[in-house]
Image (cartoon, grey):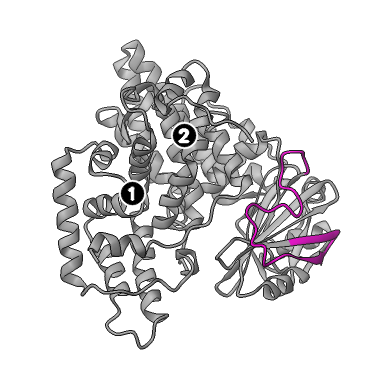
Amino acid sequence: MTTPDPRTDAELIARSLGEPHAFGLVFDRHVGAVHAFVQRRVGRDLAEEVTAETFARGFAARGRYDAAQEHALPWLLGIASNVLRRHWRSERRRLAAYARAVQHERPGAAPDVDGDVMGAVARLPRRQREVLLLAAWADLTYAEIARALDLPIGTVRSRLARARSRLGAEAALGPSRPVIASLDDVKEPSRV
Amino acid sequence: MSELELVRRLAPPVDPPTPVALARMRARATGRRARRTPRPRWLLAPLATAAALALVVVLFQAGGGGQERAFAAETVRAAEGAPRLLLGGWTVTRVDEWSAGTGEMTFSQGDRQVELSWLPTRSSGPKVGAAKDPDPGVELEVGVPGGRAVVNRYPDSDDYTAVWRAGDLTVQARAIAPSPDDFAGVLRRLEQVDARAWLRALPASAVTPSEQRDAVDEMLAGLPLPPGFDAGSLRGGAATRDRYQLGAKAAGAVACGWLATWAEAKAAGDDAGVRRAVVALASSRDWAILREMNAEGDYPEVVWEYADAVAGDGTVMGGKRLGVEESYKSALCG
């Protein structure tokens, strides 16, 4: 068993300026979380591409990393969010298809809250959806989301509040569960 | 339950990246021949450099190209270095090789797809029978051309993989399937064919080595070429390429040449040089190859993002705003 490197992400990133391979340790720490977040949003086919671009952009921009921030995951997820903006058509299509699939797979479960909620997520304005999904699917705090998206924390709170309000208005909340294995089960009409 | 909790609970399950995918992403993340392009394009570089060479194969059926082609000797020789696997009843919808003995294919049948990849067998490549985090409830062997494939399933999913050795290559197949038996049945339809039969089965989007010179020239026709541009290296490929990826290579070489020109002129205070590069890059929205590719992937949008950046404040978004000079190579250039 190998011993985890005790250095912080900030220390490794600083070191990678002279020793680029040190960035590989940052990659190893966070690739799972970044890949999972990206895959949930755009599916398996695009996840590898977007994740790779996220780390490549991070590597290119590491000279401007804020050394006061020990943990790099919010920074990386912010980069991922920017990369994902080019895939917004794909994301909306997949979320909408996922919502339909959830409804379709649960005959007799009326009203289908899960499908309603996922449909509402797909219809959210992009900026609200970004904040919501960083909170819900990446478990970032308000402060971390603010850092990821380079926003004032008040803006994060207001966007999240608006997103939640909109979801609440569109779906009556109640217990249920997802029943399809993956967004990748949903047929994607074309590569985006 | 709050709205946030509900959305959190509805998060789609995810599959971890494969070891091969991790190797590709890691290589790019640490700047080893980093590329930022649509997926197949950047797969090339890390895989070519990674010692671990794995093969992902998609199952397909002969006849995908739909037209008879005459194949030059160099094309046949190159094909002989591939596994040349077809999947009975399935159609080849994509093939891309980035070097001899390394490539991937997609086979389609209705809504279903099987992906096949192959790499030279090396110490750090995928191990036969050693899928990452396999579901212990699913482990069986299936006879495939040249050997026996070990089938695994990712836990709590219907995502199956099979890895096997075929001569000097390691081959991997991956597909969504309703059951282990179904996936095994698909694998049993694999057949190895001779080079010409394999080439005949490729889709029209496959550009064979002997076709690449003309294809590249057609892609470059009408494009403003940057100073010192040399198309020679684009024309001499020894493997069958996917047209989209070849387009990214050709258009990317032009765009990167102009971005380098822009950066040098800007640093030298050469306003006329900057303007020439800005105008050339602005024309990229009319480049036929990019317009064709735009229906299939995002590479053109990245070129246009940079074209807009040099015409504007010289930055693109990347978590923080990034300067064109510091980011364009990893974004666009091989």
Indicate the amino acid at tag 1: Asp
Residue at left offset 36%, top offset 17%: B265
Indicate the amino acid at tag 2: Ala
Q: Nearer the viewer, mark 2 or mark 1?
A: 1
Task: Indicate left or right for B195 with A110 as reference.
Answer: right
- Parent chain of label 2: A
Alpha carbon of mark 2 to alpha carbon of mark 1: how far? 23 Å
Q: Position of residue B172 (x, y in %)?
A: 70, 55
Which residue in the structure is indicated by mark 2?
A: A56
Q: Position of residue A80 (x, y in %)?
A: 38, 43
The residues colored magenta run B121-150
Q: Which mark is residue A139?
A: 1
- The answer to the question of whether label 2 and label 1 lie on touching residues, with beta carbons closer than 8 A, is no
- Parent chain of label 1: A
- Classify 10 Å Cα crowding around label 1: few (below 14), some (14-19), many (20 and above): some
Q: Nearer the viewer, residue B139 or B226?
A: B139
Residue at left offset 36%, top offset 75%: A100
Q: Nearer the viewer, residue B62 or A122?
A: A122
Residue at left offset 20%, top offset 65%: A167
Q: Position of residue B194 (x, y in %)?
A: 84, 60
Where disc 2 sits, the SS reads helix
Pointers 2 and 1 within a single chain: yes
Residue B163 falls inside the magenta stretch:
no
- In the image, residue B46 sits, relative to residue A70, either above or below, namely below
- Classify 10 Å Cα crowding around label 2: few (below 14), some (14-19), many (20 and above): many
- In the image, residue A87 sits, relative to residue A2, either above or below, namely below
Q: Quadrant of the C terminus of chain B?
A: top right
